[in-house]
Structures are given as C-alpha cells and as structure tokens.
Amino acid sequence: MLGARSAAPILLTFLLPALLLAADPSHTRNVILVTADGLRWQDLFHGLDPLLANEKSVSMDPASKDADDRRARFATRESLAPFFWTTLAKKGVVLGNVNVTNAYRVSYPGYSEILTGRASDDIIKGNDPIQQPHETVLEFLKARLSLSKDRVALFSSWDHFHYIAEHTPGAIFINAGYQDSASSPDLSRLQHVALTPWDEARHDAFTFELALDYLRQHQPRVLVISFDETDDWAHSHRYDRVLDMIAAFDAFLNRLWTTLQSMPAYRDSTTLIVTSDHGRGSTLADWSDHGKKVTGADKIWLAILGPDTPASGELPVHAEQRDIAPTIIKLLGQNPSDYKGATGSPIQSAFRP
Ligand SMILES: [Zn+2]
C-alpha cells in the first residue's frame, strides 16, 4: 500500500499528461495538404460552367452523347464534388475568397507560396526548374518535430516538386512525376505504360494510389499530395476531362479521408487542407489559361477539415495563399513566428475560438 508521500508523484505521473492534454488547444497530430492544380473556383463552387456546357471548342459538343452524360452528371456543385460539399464543407471550413499574392499566377510561384508562406517574386518567376531558395515549411516541421525523413512526404503528379518542395535536396521524402515508389511495385511499373500526353506529369490516379500505399506503410505526420490533371486538361481545351478530373479529385479526397479515419494513427487527430496553386480566367477566351495577364488567375479557394477546425461551412472570410504554411505550423502546435521569412499569418477561422 502506498503512503501519502509516494502517492503524490504517482498521481502526478498519471494526471499530468491528461491535464496538459486538456489545456492544449491543438489536437492536430498530422497534417495532410492536398492540391489540385489550377482547379477553378468557378467549377468547384458552382458545378458545370454554363459558359462551357454546350461549347464544341472545349469538347462539350451540344450533339454529343458523352457531353450530355457530363451535363447531366455534373450540373451542380454537389454532383460534381459530393465529398467536398457534403462532408468537407459541412464538418469543416471552406473559403472561396482566397488570393494568390505572388505576381506570376503560375504553378511554381503558387506552390512555393503555399510551402514557404511568402511570395518569392525576385527568384521564382515561373516554372523553370530551379531549387527552392528558402527552407520550406516541410523542412521546418521535420526539424521542429524531430521527424525522420520518411515521416515528411510529398507525392505529386508533376516532376518539378523535386525542386519546389525542398531547399536542401534530399531533406524530405519526395515522389514526383514518373517515379517509382517502393511501397507500390505494381503501380510503379504501370505508370510508365499508362502515359499522359505530357512529359512532366503522370496521371493523378497513380499519384493518389502511390500516396495512399505510402501512407498506410509509413504513416507520415506531414504529407502533401499534389494533383495536376485539372490544369493540363484545361490547357488542352478539354473541359470534359477537366470535369472528369474534378470528380476524380473529389473521390480521391473521399477515399483519403475514409482511410485516415479508419487508422488509429490518424483518426480524429489529422487535419486535411485542400487548395490550389492558382486560378484561371472566367471567359471563353481565357478559362483555360492563367498567368500574370489573365484576369482572376489570382483567385483561389481553400478548405480545412480536422479536430481543431469548427464546422463553420462556407465563410466569406478573406485569406491569402501565403497564410497556409503558418496555419499548418500552428495546427501542429508550433509557433509560426519561429518560421523565419514567412509573411503570411495563421487563418483564424481554421481554429475553434
Ligand atoms: Zn497551367
């Protein structure tokens, strides 16, 4: 039997962690960031765009049965992206008023702004494959949380992420473009024969399945999954394929969230952040395009779902692309001001008051 003297430290040993946990406002242990390249708010927030719905020049021929099928299936935002609008938006926060602050409104500057919390306009001026000039939030978190390399991972369809995602080559785990993954030998082989029309990007389906296999085997605390096809099909003027890939993207999110909630390492302790690198135009002439000269290409969107985020749904709150990295840092219980050089701030609506 324990005397009063020896009971106190034992009580403290058992109670202290519980008390600390109760006082800790952050419940997020893992963050998963998912991006869809150039996915327009015009489509995600409204469903099939009436401007393009019957437009032959974007493969939506009014007389086509295939286009008819898409016109029927993707008419509303809930039918185009059911997980996004019926689960993510209901249980989390969706912001439709988010701005890119870099001047270029193309992919590398956008992903760099997301992953470094700043617009690096003097160095990252386009999509040239140059090494990221700043320590990324992924590298910062790996050091700050003392994580091994395999627990900070990025899977992307676009091969340029080897340059974008890290300042120090080899700092984190990156699988980008047509690259094999030891966690998925069969899919690794298949991706080289199921080719896209573009040399720099593999199909998003491979990126997703490879990331999911990796997640199950390595359980990363910080994971980025970056999809490409919503951008490249738009550049190819294939609105039919853009719609297909938005629906596929939504299905990926659904499977990802279901998988996370089925794993003890992730259930109720994981925040999912979903966004885009840039917007694109709103007219028939420029819906497929983006960049400095395209009006509205700086307009993006953002969604957050997780244990620290209130179920506020769609909010008219303004945020900026550079706010995403500080938000991730704060979600993981760290101080965003320790991440030097970032100019964004944590998004308040991502946190319960
Ligand atoms: Zn593009």
Image (cartoon, grey):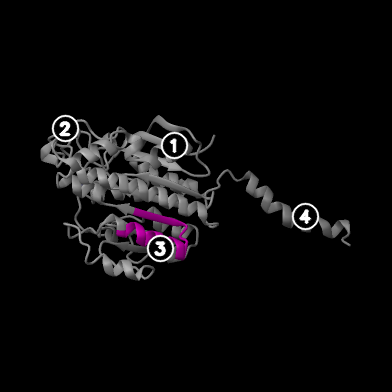
Instruction: Using a 10 Å C-alpha cutoff, classify the residue at mark 1 as few (fewer than 14 neighbours), some (14 to 19) or many (20 or more).
Output: many
- Which residues make up the magenta segment? 206-225
First in sequence, mark 3 or 4: give its number.
4
How far is the residue under mark 2 from the one under mark 4? 67 Å
The quadrant of the rendering that contains the N terminus is bottom right
Q: Is residue 346 visible?
A: no
Name the amino acid, label 3: Asp
For the residues carrying marks 3 and 1, which lies nearer the camera in this image? 3
Please name the residue that numbered disc 3 is placed on. 213
Helix, strand or loop for disc 4: helix
First in sequence, mark 2 or 1: give its number.
1
Name the amino acid, label 1: Val
How far is the residue under mark 2 from the one under mark 3? 40 Å
Please name the residue that numbered disc 4 is placed on. 11
Q: Position of residue 315 (x, y in %)?
A: 41, 30
Up/down of 5 relative to 42, above or below: below
Helix, strand or loop for disc 1: strand
Please name the residue that numbered disc 1 is placed on. 93
Query: Disc 2, disc 4: CB below 8 Å?
Result: no
How far is the residue under mark 3 from the one under mark 4? 42 Å
Name the amino acid, label 4: Leu
How far is the residue under mark 1 from the one under mark 4? 40 Å
How far is the residue under mark 2 from the one under mark 1? 28 Å
Mark carried by residue 74: none
Up/down of 175 relative to 47, above or below: below
Helix, strand or loop for disc 3: helix
